Amino acid sequence: MAANVVINEYNGLAPGIRSNKTAGTIRFKNADDANIDLNDPLVVPGSGQEYSFEKWLRLEIAGGAFTQITNLRAYSDGANGFGAGVKLWHAVTGAYTQPVVPNEAADPPQSVAAGSPVENMSDFFTATQGSPIDLDAINTGPFTDGSPFEEIGDFLVLVMEVEPAAGNGVLAAETLTFAYDEI
């Protein structure tokens, strides 16, 4: 039997409320929650940019039989399908901090949370299968326990940016892929 690894979104005060997003949707909005609804939408600004709350994601072993998991990574398809005026930024960190809206005067986004390691974010769509985001550089593997609820690797932090050139309405979906090696 293979490892059962899930993707969790974390919201709220540390240690955070976990919501399983393995086969689900992550909604970028002006609220620190995992709800998939039309509440708290991002608004197309007249000038500058508007940022969503940070979305904190981390892998978790939820059971299964395996020897070890290593080489955790994440990537996009390399093409921004959100359209003009919409960007998606990412950063990696080893410890959770309550999600905030980054400083909207900074471009690219920089966190306003005291002591937050999320600064100098990078364009998510430059992370591809051939050049993925490393998710075990800080919290390194191999991960061998297999106990349910064992969090593994680093946090992937995402922020959506909306600029004046963006259109109104709900955006098309994009795919975020998590991968790892298992023996």
Image: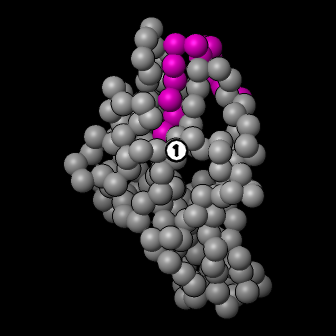
Q: In the figure, residue 80 lies in which quadrant?
A: top right
Crowding near pointer 1: few (<14 within 10 Å), some, many (20+)? some
Residue flagged by tag 1: what amino acid is it? Ser
Residue at the spot 58% in from the left edge and 75% down from the top edge: 61
Q: Secondary structure at mark 1?
A: strand
Residue at the spot 52% in from the left edge and 34% down from the top edge: 160
Residue 28 in the image: state x and y as whole percent: 52, 35
Q: In the figure, residue 170 lies in which quadrant?
A: top right
In the depicted structure, whether residue 66 falls above or below residue 87: below
The span picked out in magenta is 159-172
For disc 1, the marked residue is 122
Residue at the spot 41% in from the left edge and 65% down from the top edge: 94
Choose between 34 and 29: the one closer to the eye. 29
Q: In the figure, residue 6 lies in which quadrant?
A: bottom right
In the depicted structure, whether residue 42 falls above or below residue 32: above
In the depicted structure, whether residue 72 falls above or below residue 70: above
